[in-house]
Image (cartoon, coloured by chain):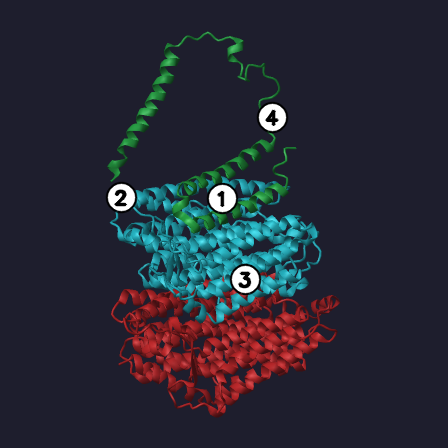
Amino acid sequence: MVPFALSLLVLLPLVGAAIVLLIPKGQKSDSLIKWFAVVWSVIPLLLASYLWFVLFDPNASKMQFEEAYLWISSINVRYHVGVDGLSMPLVWLTTLLTVLGLFYSSYVIHERAREFFFMFLLLETGMIGVFVSLDFFLFYVFWELGLVPMYFLIAIWGHAEDRPQYSAIKFFLYTLVGSVLMLLAIIAMYINTSTATTPGTFDLIELATKRPFANDFVFASLAFWGIFLAFAIKVPLFPFHTWLPDAHTAAPTAGSVILAGILLKLGTYGFVRVLVPIFPQVFQANVLPIAILATISIVYGALVAMAQTDFKRLIAYSSVNHMGYVILGVAAAVAIGGANLTDRAIALNGAMLQMFNHGVITGALFFIVGILYERAHTRDLKSFGGLGAKTPVYGAILLTASFASLGLPGLAGFISEFMVFRGAFATLPLIATICVLGIVFGAAMMLWKVIQNVLLGVFDEKRWAEQEKHGVKLYDMTRFEVITLAPLLFLMVLIGVYPSVILNTLNTISVAILGQIVK
Amino acid sequence: MSLSVPDLNLRIIAPVLIVAISALVVLLGELVTSSAQKRGLGYASLVGLLAAGGAAMGLWDAHAVAFREMVRADNFGVFLTLTILAGAVLCILLSFDFTRAHRIETGEYYALILFSVTGMLLMVTAADLIIIFLALELLSLPLYILAAFKREDERSLEAGLKYFLLGAFSSAFFLYGIALVYGATGTTNLARIAASAPSEMLLIGAGLLLVGFAFKVALVPFHWWTPDVYEGAPTTITAFMSVAVKAAAFGAFLRAFLVALPALAMDWRVVLAIIAVLTMTLGNVAALLQANIKRMLAYSSIAHAGYILIALVAMGGAGVSAALFYLLAYTLTNLGAFGAVIALGEGERERLNVSDYGGLARMQPLLAAMLTVFMLSLAGFPPFAGFVGKFLIFGAAVQNGWAWLAVVGVLNSLVSVYFYLRPVVAMYMSEPVEGWGAPRVAPLVALALVLALIGVIALGVFPAPAIALAAGGLGR
Amino acid sequence: MPVDYLPILVMLIVVSAFAAIALTISALVGPRRPTPAKLSPYESGMPPFGSARRRVPVKYYLTAVLFILFDIEIIFFYPWAVLFRQLGWFGLIEMALFVLVLLVGYVYVWRKGGFDWD
């Protein structure tokens, strides 16, 4: 039993960030800051690992490690935190990616390192806070809290030729639009659940049982769409995805990893945690448009990715494609149709697993892109070729990650995509059929654009020899890069071969959530 | 035959008296101090303000009226008294070095601020329209002089003249409104007005009162004086005006409309709602176009008046406590923002153009971080005071059936993020501009900034005590 | 109640009408025989010299304002003086405080040289 386990998880990065600020300036201060930040970020990872692998009960459908204290009594806001099968893996993934991101950054970030590590740790607090919050007000506070450090990370340490400040403010304002509409919905739900004798509630668990606006479909729809917009922008769901390519390409490598790996999951997590339990009728009534948007994200996302010549932008659009699968799974699980609980649970399990997998896989891909960019100072796919022979270790890792991304059996991506389609065929057969195209295009984009252009073909010796005069040298992976990617590759293979390690945890929650809404 | 002595409850107006006496003492002190000792007068005024604060805290839960029900001491009044005193204390802390650098350090400066505070304190405890008018004039006249205090700067003179002319005009409207209300109800006492039957003349009188209040608080379309006056006045006075006058004027505004005129609520609620929408929108949109940070903060203060007006439209205990909390949060945040602008001045030159803030994050990281916090709080970002204030206001609006107003407010907050982030972007992502050296922050200014920062963060993370205090309610 | 204000409206109309009629009739009926002396601005009988737009020294304004302030103070003395007996001690202390506040102002203006003509 760890007392205040989740509060520790949320606050430890914040404390670390404060300490980073206070480390005195000196000659060796930069390396001290980096070393300290990396070591300090391992503590939440160890704590999360202990909580998940040792203490967590995968068969309990209730919230675990709950803590609840009264925070603002006049509006009945509580500091209420807890995790279940959905949030525990995501919290663990957050700590893992933060450690890897900080570790990688300690080698590549040389300017204004102190502020970078401060922002990164602050961001970790925000993200973990969102995943463990069980009070909507608290959820909102952490949601907004994560925006500011991400903005700074993109704007200050972004690559100069990618318009970092424009991309950062676009990301910031775009996400904020959704957030403020969500705020109104939160207030409306609070007022709707308050009666003459009892105050309203912000508690997510209570709201799921109290079902605000249960009798008023119009208001329920308004609240639903307000919150939907906030999450859909974050996911990102077509047509709210236009901030993503700019933000991802402009961000520094570790920033992109965290953005793709975790921040996008905040949106999909919101779908499953908030929209499905609290607004099931509205969701079910609108499954078709949402599923269509997911389809467009999948197919259109893959097509646009295929058309890219910038490596990082391609991976960014592939995120749109992958996140579309998650929303497809969620929509399929909720849809009214002839399906039974098993099919729906499979769809929802697939969606949740896809969240986790995408974090691992696309996180790894962004690291890989960053490694190449550090060497070659370019991301133009057409300029590469023959790297498979020249840098074999890099080639092998890129190959593995690409195959995982396109869903090759044996690697993680296949399990989640298969489950999503298995479940979607039961409730949304036509849509699922169209979405299969997405897999085809996704495979094409990876095989053709990435693997063929980068790894295969002829290595342009003359051109790269000339580039060496400008300090560009294509050497194989260094040790720290391999260390960064190793855990992610391990996870890809592990989940691909033995997914039960995580599926059992997810399944309990899927069944619980679906049991509540499908009567 | 001896006339009866009216109920002189000096305890109720103790804060007002203390500040008034301090003002007179400082004024006399101006005559006996040499120019090097003027700072001591500033310290003396701080002592007076803190003593008044102590007296105000002693009035908590007093719930009494005095002077033939002309003055009322209730928790509403005490909360605003403390807010205004906090604003004045922070302003004077910022003034010490500013006035010396701009060569306006005289005893009259501090005395005039204290006289204005006297008027403000009287305004928030007034229970009678005549007292409100008296207090209005008492708080305005020193500010007219203070706005023009930098006699060599023509912008300052222009600011003072504009403020005076337009202010006198609006006071005349206000007085005419009082006359009509008296004609319609036969009384100027707020509680007794509420008890009289409503009529068209009362409505017209209320409209004229609205004009007077709207000018003071800078609501559209009576806001035209604000950008020019705020830009021209000395920055410490601008800071003081933007927070304390709003707190005092809104206090009287809330009292007059919620205590005296609730019967006419059907009529003035819609009008105020439209004014709130226009005010927020115009304030935020105009601020987007400003390059001068003082003008930008002026337009932003217009927008914030619009947000507070939403709470007035909402009515009810929720609306009143939301407005009070927001006024406190706004006071601390805005003074912090202006304080950062003052801290970055060099001698008589002030860092007013947003592009001049380039590279500050490297030269003065703490100050840059503080200004970032204040800007984010003004934009309504958690976990700062501004967010809780906006949450309470929008919550009150939705609760009382004005959800569309909350939507407009929320969208306006969104728009405002852009111009609040502009100085932040300049500080963190731009290179330093030529012609400015590394800024040095004076210790008292730093103290004021730290106090404001602590207040903003404390109100954002632990708002419960302040919300409970703000819910004291308007006594009858 | 608004009907009680009718006499004011009537008076307003009568006054405006009187002024309008007086000006109109004198413009229509009066003779017009301008001479240079009649058209020049009035300066207490003396021939005018200098620009009409010279800056007025502010000491005239200062004197006027100070006069007004202390004159109003004196006006406040009158009701007190009339009811002096009935107001008793209360009235005396009240008036003393009033005079004291204004005395501070008086001392301030005095020491700042507001009463010096040059």
Q: Chain C drawn in what color?
A: green
Name the quadrant of the C terminus of chain A. bottom left
Disc with the residue nearer the chain's start (3 vs 1): 3
Q: Chain A drawn in what color?
A: red
Q: Which chain is cyan?
A: B
Taking the image as shown, residue A140 lies to the left or right of residue A17, namely left
| Place of residue B382 in the rendered image (x, y in percent of width and height, measured from the top left) | 48, 67
Residue placed at 51% from the left, 8% from the top? C35
| Place of residue B284 in the rendered image (x, y in percent of width and height, measured from the top left) | 47, 52
Q: Identify residue type, mark 4.
A: Arg
Q: What is the CA distance from the residue labelled 4 to the residue labelled 3?
A: 49 Å
Taking the image as shown, residue A43 lies to the left or right of residue A29, namely left
Q: Identify residue type, mark 2.
A: Glu
Q: Residues within 10 Å of mark 1 (few under 14, many from 20)?
A: some
Q: Are marks 3 and 1 on the same chain?
A: yes
**Foreground tag (4 vs 1):** 4
Q: What is the CA distance from the residue labelled 3 to the residue labelled 1?
A: 32 Å
**Foreground tag (4 vs 3):** 3
Q: At numbered mark 1, what does the secondary structure look like: helix, strand or loop?
A: helix
Residue B455 visible (yes or no)? yes
Q: Quadrant of residue A36?
A: bottom right
Numbered tag placed on residue B200 in the rendering: 2
Residue placed at 37% from the left, 53% from the top? B6
Disc with the residue nearer the chain's start (2 vs 1): 2
Residue linked to disc 4: C54
Residue linked to disc 3: B50
- The chain carrying label 3 is B
Q: Identify residue type, mark 3.
A: Leu
